[in-house]
Image (spheres, helix red, strand yellow):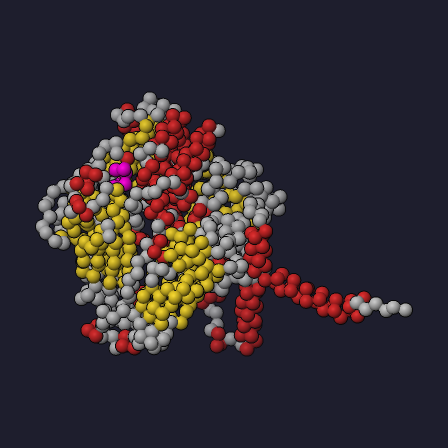
Amino acid sequence: MHNLEVLRRLSAAAILICLSANASHAGDFVPADLGAASVQSAGQAVPDIPRQMVAFRQTATAMRLEGEDAARELSFYLSAEQVATAGLLRLSYTNAVSVMPDDAVLDIELNGKPLAALPIRSPNGPATHDIPVAAKDLTVGWNQVRLRAKQHHRIDCSVQATYELWTQVDPLISGFLTSARPKDGDLAGLLSVGRNGDGATEIRVIAGNDAPQTTLRDSLPLVQTLALVLGREDLSITVGDVGGSGPGIDLYLGDPADANLPQPARDALAAAPRGLFVRQGEHGRQIVTMRGSNKSELQSLLVAAVNGPLLPLIRANKFAMTKTRIDGESPGTHPLSSIGYQTTPFAGRLFQTSFDVVMPADFYPGDYATVDLNLNAATAPGLAPGTQLLVRVNERAVASLVLYDPEGKTLENKPLELPLRAFHPGVNHVRVLAEVPLASDLVCDPAARDEARSRFLLLEETTVTIPPLARAGRLPDLAAFAGTSFPFKGPAAFDFYVDAATPARLGSALTLLTRLAMSAGHPLPAELKIGRPDPRKTTNALIVGAGGEPLELAALAGQKGDRLQPSSTDDLITASVKAGGQLSDSQALLDAFQVETRLERDQLSLKSRASDWVATASTTVNRWLAYKDIGREDVKIDPRDRLISLKQVASADGAAVWTYVNAVDETMLQQGVAALTKPATWTALEGGESVIRRSDLELVNRYPESYSFFPITDTSPANLRRLAAAWLSDNFIIYVGLVLALMGGFGWWVGYVVPRKGVRTVE
């Protein structure tokens, strides 16, 4: 209980840090010592001296520039000594083969000032450029690099061809090269750690084989804190009794006198001072020690570090996050300039920009309001018919606006309504696209292209207005789980089960926990337990397993509080079901035979075609009456094609939420967690169950037929009104029934009651 109390204090401290004072400005592994050989240098000659790589904070997803004109913001952290010695900005990239090399260019800005312009012409392999940077152009703390790629298609001038244009910066090789190594004891040196051959930032917890869970229980707050300090979305947590190799962090925790610790851990702790300490190892490895005599002292030392040297680092990460996302927690209007968008004239065929909107965990989507995109934009005269603006939310088209005007068009605070139903709790990705073709594009003459003549302009004064939201947490909802760590974000402790204490399972479970901590913005009060949960437990639980049969919802059927109804679309078998429960070979052959021998539609009889049409129409009408999106049907998955599954169910008594992560074996669990926690996949989790397929590592979301609701905390009349409107929009048939009942009641009153009761005769 004391452990939980201290962990709650740590979480509260992290929350206060994130919300308080102003922040500062915000392949193969790369060895620590890098020379300037085998790279192209921009500008003057570069002396060949040993240098160490300081990696960018952003992941590969954030380093991809797509389309004709794309911009990305990258950042890296430097100490005062590293700024004084200056260095090199190294960029390594590969581009699509369709990019025309004649005029493709990558413009680079550093801390708001132009630095260099590089040609984009490396489709057959990575091209690496070293750009000298003077000390006067650098900043102690976070430095901002802005990349802008301008690129065109080699042979195709259609709007569709612009989707084939991309330039990918390599996060393993790119960064800042400095000759000054971080000082031992400077915790900010953690921010320079590199990535391993898998493109991940590794944190390796050193624990003994005899009782690893004891060390891991004590390390949970520290591992989550390190994740928040690094601010990276590509973290991978591993567990072992010896340190790792290559770029990464080795974490040693405990007392050197503890006989349960492996000898390397006791040696590292004996040579370290008390408290949190970091020193530079070999080949880019960093050694982090947390030395304390007991659990209570370890937690006190961690709280002191969070309120001390780690304070500005966590603040800076929080500040950087708020500068790239719109917070939907409270109603308000947000200009695009507040999230880093810069007004830039556009001369291509397809303009695109994007931003994220973070909705609260208890956001209830429905048709009671809209998110308003108030456009301030302009189009040039002479654009061809078909000029239009499109808005996609979570990769679904939700709004469009015709922009065609032969004389050009100017929009001033033009509202474009985005339905709230398109959003979900957590992170929502909004893309704004403008198709602005010219008639001359059909000729496709690169020599005739006029880049000096802009076609479209989206001003940074364009705003996004978040309305008051209906607030009622619902389950299952993996979007809220991934986006805000719901329902684990609060101060209440939850059980964190791992079915067996093996390094592979424990590492996968810790990777998942750190990803949740980053979504929550603070360490989570998890209680690590080895084994399976008791069905009678009434606390929230996160359950990670590999092999064997997990506790399924079927085991809880019919018990009190079982409020979740499994989907009736298809009976999927989870990846962990034993062989006896899978489809037989005969059944699989029969299914394949029926598919192969199915008649083409034009060969069917008139009766069969009519039956198919009625069935299709009935399904469409039923989905419309249930107010479900066409195209979001559940997808059948071969049980043998399941790499990993993630799902939420209610506990036996309905008072808690259990979230299962399960794979067939440890190898698939590791691969599946790595795929689940990738930034693009993590923010795309939705519904009641998510599955990663083995065949292509693609994410498949399955949506429940019904939801249950947590107790409503906001009982104000305004929120209840919005909830009623949202509920009626979800239950369209009931809404129509109420309208018909009211109309019928009014008709009965007028036609029957009034003639008999409305006139009184006086005798």
Judge left or right: residue 749 versus residue 58.
Answer: right
The quadrant the C terminus occupies is bottom right
**Quadrant of residue 546 within the rendered picture:** top left
Query: Compared to 15, does 694 lie above or below?
Result: below
Is any atom of residue 225 visible in this view? yes
Give the residue drawn at x 18%, y 54%: 115
Query: Compared to 646, does 148 lie above or below?
Result: below
The magenta segment: 188-193
- Tally of numbered tags: 0
Give the residue drawn at x 28%, y 60%: 70
Rendered location of residue 96, percent (x, y): 25, 62
Rendered location of residue 479, percent (x, y): 46, 51
Decide whether the magenta segment is chiefly helix, strand or loop: helix
Judge left or right: residue 131 versus residue 193.
Answer: left
Q: Residue furthest top?
A: 257
Query: Compared to 685, does 436 lie above or below?
Result: below
Residue 189 lies in the magenta-colored region = yes
Judge left or right: residue 163 versus residue 358.
Answer: left
Judge left or right: residue 53 versus residue 430.
Answer: left
Which one is nearer the viewer's eye here, 255 or 70?
A: 70
Is any atom of residue 504 visible in this view? no
Which one is nearer the viewer's eye here, 559 or 227?
A: 227
Residue 336 lies in the magenta-colored region = no
Give the residue drawn at x 44%, y 52%: 328
Rendered location of residue 400, percent (x, y): 42, 68
Rendered location of residue 357, percent (x, y): 41, 54
Q: Residue furthest front?
A: 762
Query: Compared to 95, does 2 lie above or below?
Result: above
**Quadrant of residue 721 within the rendered picture:** bottom right
Give the residue drawn at x 54%, y 67%: 620
